[in-house]
Amino acid sequence: MTRDNDMGIKAAIIGPGNIGTDLMFKIIRLSDVLEMAAMVGIDPSSDGLARAGRLGYPTTHEGVDGLIAMDGFDEIEVVFDATSAGAHRYNANKLEPYGKLLIDLTPAAIGPYVVPVVNLDANLDATDVNMVTCGGQATIPMVAAVSRVTPVHYAEIVASISSKSAGPGTRANIDEFTETTSKGLEVVGGAARGKAIIIMNPADPPMIMRDTVQVVVDRLDADGRAAVEASVLEMAERVKGYVPGYRLKQKVQFQDEGTELDGLLPEDRRGGSYTRVSVFLEVEGAAMYLPAYAGNLDIMTSAALTAAETLAVARQKEKVA
């Protein structure tokens, strides 16, 4: 059963896999801003295309060219791309003449990195925004929470996800995942140097997404530690506003370190006296379409929906003005 708002901003999804299908259900069930308009793929036997068709939405298996040829394409204002980094570069090039708002859920990073709670407001005029990666959406807010209190010299994240939640698209993008997430830790999170690691855990029953965030800052006194902890807790609550399953696993951990960490830091950041701040997270999916253990996919679609709604409304206001 659909839940469309006739006055909604029309949106299409390219990529009818797990992420694209979950995003479709979020638009249908949660959004008062967007209206599902089309599902686009390249495989005529795709389950995601079939689901969209059964719900009464236009579909095409002819990729972005099929989308452009669709009746009603001119009315579509938002296009989500849930394919792969390479495919998004092609799709973005084909769509560029039409002035659509592109929400990129791949690690292509053509447009600016966007993490809604950190820098969405600074990118309201962007036409192609990159949602970094699932690991980036989970961990960059924590790095940003520390960096707004004290300079972060080094940030390292380990994203552990269930192997069952990693489909062909995720696996094809592993190299881009580490590169894009590492860069996002720096560009959005504020770290002088970032490093990202992903682990696909084959455990059965599947584990939910768990993330470890470690940052190195100058030695913190008691007041500094309290300020960092308060900032992390406040940021976690803000992320939870659009990802209900996002939570800290335990209290923020602090450990004083010395020159043994110098090798991790850029030369101009080395001082020999540091505090390592560790944040442990887990992300449980909403189980709207995907299973609850697929929190890595849930946080991407939730962040993408939040970004798209905010940016689309800003564009409409600009047109009216």
Image (tube, grey):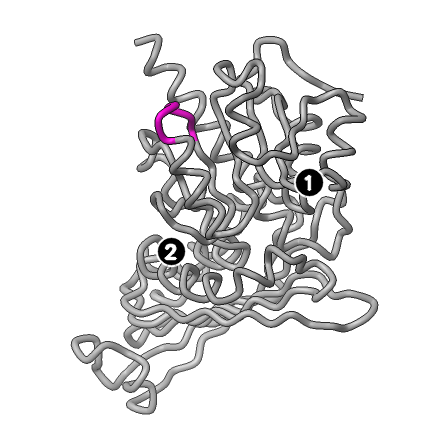
Where is residue 127? Give x, y as percent.
36, 32
Q: Residue lying farthest left?
A: 268
- Residues rendered magenta in the picture: 96-101
Residue where numbered disc 1 is placed: 22
Residue 319 visible in image: yes
Q: Quadrant of the N terminus?
A: top right
Q: Residue at x 67, y 45 (%)?
A: 17
- The answer to whether residue 267 is magenta is no
Residue under label 2, please give it. 144
- Amino acid at the residue labelled 1: Asp
Pick whichever, 306 or 73, lies toward us: 73
In this rendering, the answer to whether 132 lies above or below 154 is: above
With 175 as the anchor, is 240 left or right in this view? right
Identity of the residue drawn at 36% across and 77% down: 275
| Amino acid at pointer 2 | Ala
Total marks shown come to 2
